[in-house]
Image: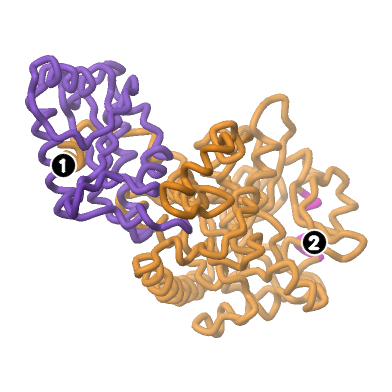
Chain colours: A purple, B orange
Amino acid sequence: MIMTDDAFEPKIIAFLCNWCTYTGADLAGTSRLQYPPNVRIIRLMCSGAVDPIYVLKADLMGADGILIGGCHPGDCHYQEGNYKARRRVVALKEILKSAGFDDERIWLRWISASEGTRFADTIREMTAAMKEMGPNPTRVEWAV
Amino acid sequence: MKTLIPVENGNTLKTLQEFLKSLLQNGVVDVLLVPMRTPGNTVTPALVSDPALLDSADPLAPVMPGNAATLAGKLSVRAPRAKVGAVLRSCEARALVELIKMQQAALEDLTLIALDCAGTYSVPVFDKKDRGEGMWVDLFQNAAAQPDVPDPDLRAACKICEQPVYEGAQIAIELLGNNLSSEIRLTMADELGARLGLSESQPNGRLAVVEKLVAARTAQRDAEFQVIRGKLEGEQGIAGVFAACIRCHNCMTVCPICYCKTCVFKSAVFDHEPMQFVDWAKQKGAYRLPADTMLFHLTRLNHMALSCVGCGMCTEACPAELPVGMVFRAIGQRLGQTFEYAPGRSLEEPLPLITFKADEWTEVGE
């Protein structure tokens, strides 16, 4: 848990596709763009390779935000992985909402390899939104 | 064609057995998957090749020891296979449709014989009621006369079952809304009817009875959904509803849709190192064991709620008596509305999570 004094610092788990969003994050780094250090990046080959079970696990273990990043529609390295990821996220959000969780903690964003600025902006935006939402209650729920 | 078989001496079951025998004798099927009375007078599905043994067939017995779609899948999934006739209730037929889409069953050489269902008892309740042969009579009469007042002993899933009739089988045995002491009405292809020596008959007033029952069950369903949603969306959420779960995985084992040979929850993914549990315990101060109980239920929802046919086998199998089936149906309905999908409705509708459109949900991914 990242806590300094009373300030709440959200922890964001990001599942990023190798070809677009991860490379975009890399570009943000090599371009020396500043963005909040609240994100923990996990690289996958495709947003379509994100098994929702790990998104759920992160959510249940107290991650305040979960970002899934993929190529823009039409740009998937594997043709259609991101379209399938989108349906999975829609289903997952519906299930979480119906089961009493806050589905607003899960974001799906298309960020290309050339959009380092957009990546930095997204992390800034998401960190601010999660600060607004407050800590994920699952941080302290042990009986889940 | 619509056809009927006269019931002799008021013995509906005997007439039904004779009809099933005719399917074997005329070579329509090589074997029949059908509920049978055992010598100990319990009811179990069996694969019958000898017509004489169909004297023990009892598809009318109001008990459902399991969802037989799983069995029909195992008998049909790959060649070489026999011509199998499967006598199934609506929820079983709908589960079979889902299994076909999941490539765990195949329609080739399979004759689906769907039977109207007025509801079933759990195995222990059926036991306490002495497993009598005529138990179905009251259920069918009550379904027609007082659809608003279901037998209180019926399984929870059956009380809210708004699909007691399955359309789209090769042979439909239409029991609801008909005078079962005088005739059994059937719908099948003209060719098949001719082969069995049956002739066309006039339709009767069955539809009104079915519609009334469906309306009553739908109202009951919506009331139950409201209750369970109140809990799921309440303070405790799904963790409150499944708080007493003992993680036996029975719900998964009996679910006709959960077909994976090795469930991820029994795979190496969950073979955690000893210190992993300690880390989690330190992270939250305490950690429920067995680990990942809500993850199990949420993942199962994610894997199969869209295909949940509401047979309620999970609820039957739960030793903690949790409303598993109600949760899955209630959430499954929401998912179905989102994806405009109804499990078991049509083989033409692809499973929502294996397909996509390029221009949908643009607001979800930005």
Left or right, residue B263 beside residue A41: right
- Neighbour tally class for label 2: few under 14, some 14-19, many 20 plus, Cα within 10 Å: many
Q: Is residue A73 above or below residue B364?
A: above
In this view of the protein, can residue B18 be seen by the observer?
no
Which residue in the protein does label 2 denote? B43
Of the pair B321 and B311, the residue shown nearer to us:
B321
| Magenta segment, prevailing SS (helix, strand or loop) | helix
Which residue in the protein does label 1 denote? A126
Query: Which residue is found at the position 32% from the left and 49% from the top?
Result: B340
Q: Secondary structure at mark 1?
A: helix
Instruction: Please report, as a chain letter, where disc 2 is located.
Output: B
Q: Nearer the viewer's eye, disc 1 or disc 2?
A: 1
Q: Which mark is residue B57?
A: none
Picture quarter containing residue A43?
top left
Image location of residue B125, percent across then percent down: 73, 74
Which kind of residue does numbered mark 1 sit on?
Met
Q: Are marks 1 and 2 in contact (CB under 8 Å)?
A: no
> What's drawn in magenta, residue-wise?
B14-22
Query: Which residue is found at the position 56% from the left and 65% from the top?
Result: B244
